Amino acid sequence: IHESNSFVTNLVSSLSVDTETLQKQIDELSTFSDTPAPSVTRVLHTENDVLARSYIKNLMGISGLSVREDAVGNIYGEISSSSRGVWIGNEAELASVATGSHIDAIPYSGKYDGVTGVLGALEAINVLKRSGFKPRRSLEVIMFTSEEPTRYGISCLGSRLLAGIESLAKDLTSIVDGKNISFLDAARSAGYAKEHNDLSSVFLKKGSYFAFVELHIEQGPILEKEGTSIGIVTAIAAPASIKADFEGTGGHAGAVLMPNRNDAGLAAAELALAVEKHVLESGSIDTVGTVGILELHPGAINSIPIKSQLEIDIDEKRRNAVIEKIHQSAITIAKNRGVTLSELKIVNQDPPALSEKSIIEAAEAVSKELNLTHKVSPMGMIFIACYKGYSHKPEEYASCEDMENGVKVLALTLAKLSLQ
Amino acid sequence: IHESNSFVTNLVSSLSVDTETLQKQIDELSTFSDTPAPSVTRVLHTENDVLARSYIKNLMGISGLSVREDAVGNIYGEISSSSRGVWIGNEAELASVATGSHIDAIPYSGKYDGVTGVLGALEAINVLKRSGFKPRRSLEVIMFTSEEPTRYGISCLGSRLLAGIESLAKDLTSIVDGKNISFLDAARSAGYAKEHNDLSSVFLKKGSYFAFVELHIEQGPILEKEGTSIGIVTAIAAPASIKADFEGTGGHAGAVLMPNRNDAGLAAAELALAVEKHVLESGSIDTVGTVGILELHPGAINSIPIKSQLEIDIDEKRRNAVIEKIHQSAITIAKNRGVTLSELKIVNQDPPALSEKSIIEAAEAVSKELNLTHKVSPMGMIFIACYKGYSHKPEEYASCEDMENGVKVLALTLAKLSLQ
Ligand SMILES: [Mn+2]
Ligand SMILES: [Mn+2]
Ligand SMILES: [Mn+2]
Ligand SMILES: [Mn+2]
C-alpha cells in the first residue's frame, strides 16, 4: 500500500487533463436536445437520448474501455440500459472501482449536470492511461439510466434498479408516462428490454464494486462563494417527492357563483403556498421544497378546474416533518374547499446515503497531494464549483479550470482505490 | 302587422317539435369529440370539428336551407367558416332574421352548450316548415366559428369577425396556437381561408340582419330552481379575460435555498388566490372570477418554475374594478417575490351587449301565447333551463321538455320577427 500510494504521488506530476476536448464533448453532447440551445432537454428513451447514448458508448470505445449494456447480454439478462465501460485491472477477479453519472436532462436545463460526471470520468480514464498507470482493481465508467424523474416520476431509476429494489423492478413493468407510453415499450424502442419483462436481471450481486465515486457540479453556490474548486462528499440526501391530486366539481367559469364552487385549482394554489410556508417554518436553512409541477384539468380559461395535480420535491433530512405538515395542509384545504384529496402519494423517500469513509479519505488525500483546497460537504460526491450554483437551467456553467481539478481528483482517487 | 300576428297565433296550435330526433342529433353530434363520452371536446379546425361541421351542413341541406360558408365564395371572399343556412323569404330583399349558436366544445365539457342553439334552430325551421309558415324576411341559421377561446384565446372569434372588428382580422393573420400552428394554417387544413390572408372579407355589411336571436342552455341554476322552463334575455355580459405571465430565476429544486428563490409558480399561486379574494370582496354575488389555466415552465418536479402563465376569466359588468385590483395584486406579488410581471394583458373586454327591445318583446309575447312561464333575465338570449346549472362539464343536461319549449319559443319568435 505504501508503494502503491507513492506511485499515485508520482502520478501527480504527470497528470494532463485535456480540458479543451472535454469542453468540446460537453458542447457536442448538449446538441442532442429536444429544446433549442443553450437549453438542454433529454428525456429517457427518446430519440435524442438514444443518440446521446451512442455518443457516450463511442467515446468509451475510443478510451479503450470494453462496453457492456445491462440488457440483451446473458450475464445481465435484459433491460436497464446503463452503459458501462470497463478497464480491466491486473487483478480482474477483485471487485471493481466505478465512477460515472447520468446524461439525461430535465426540460430546459443546462449542459453540465450529470454530463461532467460521465465525460469527466472518461477523461479521468484517459488521464490515467496517458500517465502509464496500470489498475489493480478494474476501473469502470457507468452511465446511469434516468437519474432525473422527468418521464416516469422516478429519480435514479437505473441506479435504484442496480441496487436490487424488487418493488421498482415490478412497478416498471406496468408504469406509463404522461402520454400513456409504457416504460417497457419506450425501453424497447430505444433498444433495451428486448426479450422479456423481468427486470430483476439488472440487479447487481452484492459486492460487485469495491467503491463508487461520482464527479458532479455542485448545484449550489457554496464552493464558488468560498473560492474553493472541489467539494468532497460525506452524505447524499435523497429527495422525497409528493404527488397530490385534488378533485372538485368544475363547471362553467361564467355561470357558477363563487359560493357554489369547489375549485380544485385554488386548492392546488393554496397547497403550493403551504409547501413554502412549512419549509420556511422548518427552521433549517438547508430544507427546501418546490412545487415544480402544477396541472389543472381541463385547463380551459372558461372552465373551473375540476381536477388539479401537484408534484412537490422536498430535500434534506429533516424533510419528514415537513412532509407530514404538507399532508395535513392538503387535508385541511380539501375540507375547506369541498374538494376531494383523491391522492397523496409520497415517493422516493429513501434515507440519506452516506459516502464510504475509504472514498472520502482517498479523495481528501488526493486533494492534498494536488495542493487543492477542498471543502468537506454534507451532501454530494466530488463536487466541482459551478457558476452562482445554477443548475437545471440553461445558465448552468462550470469553468474549465474547476473541471480540470475535478477530473484530476477523480483520476487519482480512482487510481488510489484501484490499488487498495 | 295585426293580420300576421294572428297568423302566428294560429301557428301555436299546429306546432310540433320532433324532440326525439333533436335528442338523437345532440347525441350523434357529441360523438365528434377528442375525449371519451360523456365528455365532449371539440376544438376549432380539428378533425372532429370538421366532421361536426359537415354533420350540421348536411342537416341544413335536409331542412331545405341553402348553405353558404363565408369562405371561398365570391360574395364573402375567403375564410371564416361560419356556416349559414338560409330560408329565402317572400321579400328576400329585406334584412334577414337570424338565429344560431356554436358547436365547438371546450376540453371535457358536455353536449348541450351551443349545440342546442344550432340543432334547436334547425328544428325550429323544421317546425315552421311543417306548419306551413311562409317567411316574409328570410330566416337564417348561423353556426358561429369558435365561440370558445380554447385554441387561440379568443372567444366568439367568428361572430366578432362578422361584426367587422378590424384589429381581430389583423391579429388572426399572425396568431398561433399552443403548438405553434397558425390560425391560417389550421383554417386551411379545415378547408377555409384558401386563397389569401385578408380576413376582412368576412365582415358583414351594416344592416345585414333585422334581428338575431339565440337559443342556449342557461348555464346557471336559476330557471331550474324556480321551475321555469324559459328565460328571455335583456343583456349579455361579455366575459373579460386576463393573461398574466411571471418570470423568475428558476434553478434546481434541491439546490437553491429558499431565501434565494424567485419562484414564478408561487407568484402564480398567490395571484390565483388573489383573484378569488378580489371577486369575493366585490360585494356582488353575480361577479365571478376563475383561473382556468395555470401553467408552469419548465414543469419538472425538480426544477423551480422559472415562468408561469395564468389565464383568468372575469364575468359581470362590475368586473372592471376587480380587474384593476387583480392587476395591482400581480404587481405587488411580483415585487415581493422578486419575479417579473412580464405580461399582463386584458383581452375581450367588450361592454355588455343589450338585446334588441323588439326581440325581447317578440319572445315575451310568444311565451305568453304558448302559456309558458318565463323569466326575464339580465343575461342571456332565450334560455333553456338546465340541470343544476351545470355547463362545461360532462354532466351538462337539458330535458327534452325544456328543449321543446325552447324550440317553440324560438320558432314563433323567428316567425314573428320575419313578418315585421
Ligand atoms: Mn439534475
Ligand atoms: Mn445530476
Ligand atoms: Mn361554452
Ligand atoms: Mn355556449
Image: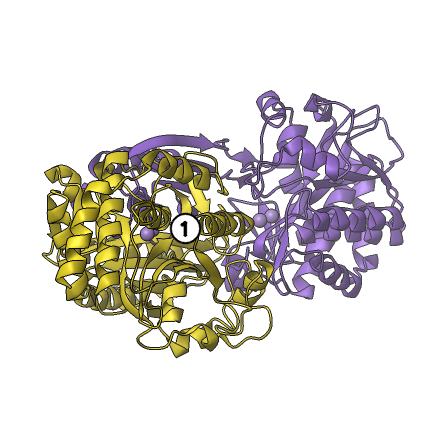
Chain colours: A purple, B yellow
Q: Is residue B379 visible?
A: yes
Q: Is residue A280 visible?
A: no
Residue A259 as seen in the image, left or right of residue B243: left
Quarter containing the N terminus of chain A: top right
Quarter containing the C terminus of chain A: top right
Looking at the image, which is closer to me, B124 or A7? B124
Label 1 environment density (alpha carbons within 10 Å; few <14, some 14–19, many ≥20)? many
Residue B216, percent across and down?
A: 28, 49
Residue A76, percent across and down?
A: 78, 26
Figure quadrant of residue A67: top right
Q: Residue at x 13, y 43 (%)?
A: B372
Figure quadrant of residue A406: bottom right
Chain assignment, label 1: B
Residue B371 as seen in the image, left or right of residue B236: left
Residue B67, percent across and down?
A: 47, 59
Q: In this figure, which residue is indicated by the disc labeled 1?
A: B103
All told, the count of numbered labels is 1
